Amino acid sequence: MILLPPDNFLALPEQWSGLERSRVAVLPVPYEHTTSFGKGTASGPGSILEASGQVELYDEELDAEIYTLTGGIATLKPLAPGGNDAVAVESIRKNVNGLIEKDKTVVCIGGEHTISIGSARAYSERYQDLSVLQLDAHSDLREEYEGNRYSHACVMARVYEFNKNIVQAGIRSQCREEADFIRQKQIKTFYAFDLRGRRYSADRYAWHDAVIGSLRENVYLTIDCDFFDPGLMPAVGTPEPGGFGWQETVSFLRRLSGCRRIVGFDITELSPIPGLIHPQFVMAKLIYKLIGYIFSRG
């Protein structure tokens, strides 16, 4: 049921990676079916887990070995949902729901962004006041793409069907259909050019307050790797220039974690590049850092 060292997240020893005592459960979901440009997201979870073994367990910012704040971090064996996309999404929902029932904070590692539908639905069923915050280069609000309503390009359109409280940040690529949908439904979308242009004030951190102020108390966070600039994160299927850097992202996540309760999150769309190791290491460190922010809250 769970992965043991050295194959689990951070290569944690068994006493710190058992499911019963750990308050965090990492669920790898190497699902890839609808990617439309660069391929390889099915290898993303494994590459992140492998790289995580090189992450230092002590965090100088938080002055803590983060895994001790959570009673440990358990890593489930990779979920390989079968059937069509709808069946796969339902399988993910059921598995995440089962972990929520065990009082775990679930971290899903994709795989393509489609996996987020199942996880976000499980959390939306548990928390009526839940916002879904999407950090992404793309709106993912198409009704269908290449004939598939479960395409990675339609993720947030599917989420909107069961949770109207979606907030998007970092968006810098969309089609006219998505722009119209955002206006018609009054989706809270924070475009990269506005965040970078300091529309919200001369204070470079003012956009933090703007985004966070649009969220409810409980937040499910979905992070597409292409939210980051390709210079930092080239290993994605659909890279977009003008993305975000490490420090500006983690400073936002720390502020978010202090102001709202992040109940679960996912990382998706990493497509490893042979011979290039820094993208998966960056994502492994981001996961660990975000867990630390969540469990040091208050």
Image (spheres, rainbow, N blue to C red):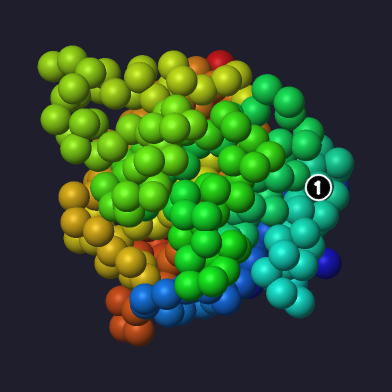
Q: Nearer the viewer, residue 165 or 68?
A: 165
The quadrant the C terminus occupies is: top right
Which residue is outermost to the bottom? Answer: 274
Residue 290 in view, yes or no: no
Q: Which residue is mark 1?
A: 97
Q: Which residue corresponds to the image point at 60% horizontal and 63% vertical from the top-left? A: 150
From this view, report whether residue 161 is shown above or below residue 130.
Answer: below
Q: Residue at x 21, y 31 (%)?
A: 194
Quick one: label 1, few (<14), some, or many (20+) residues within 10 Å?
Answer: many
x 59%, y 62%: residue: 149
Give the quadrant of the N terminus. Answer: bottom right
Specify whether 175 is left or right of 2.
left
On screen, residue 198 versus residue 75, left or right, reads left
Q: Is residue 287 left or right of residue 204?
A: right
Amino acid type at circle 1 is Asn
- x and y percent of residue 66 in the render? 55, 40
In the depicted structure, whether residue 286 falls above or below residue 168 = below
Label 1's element? helix
Name which quarter of the figure residue 220 lies in.
top right
Left or right of 12 in this view: 126: right
- Which percent across, then down, holds residue 85? 68, 69
Relative to 133, does residue 255 appear above or below in the rendering? above
Picture coordinates of residue 185, whole percent (x, y):
49, 31
Q: Is residue 184 visible?
A: yes
Query: Which one is nearer the viewer's eye here, 151 or 50?
Result: 151
Residue 121 rendering spot, x and y as whole percentages: 71, 45
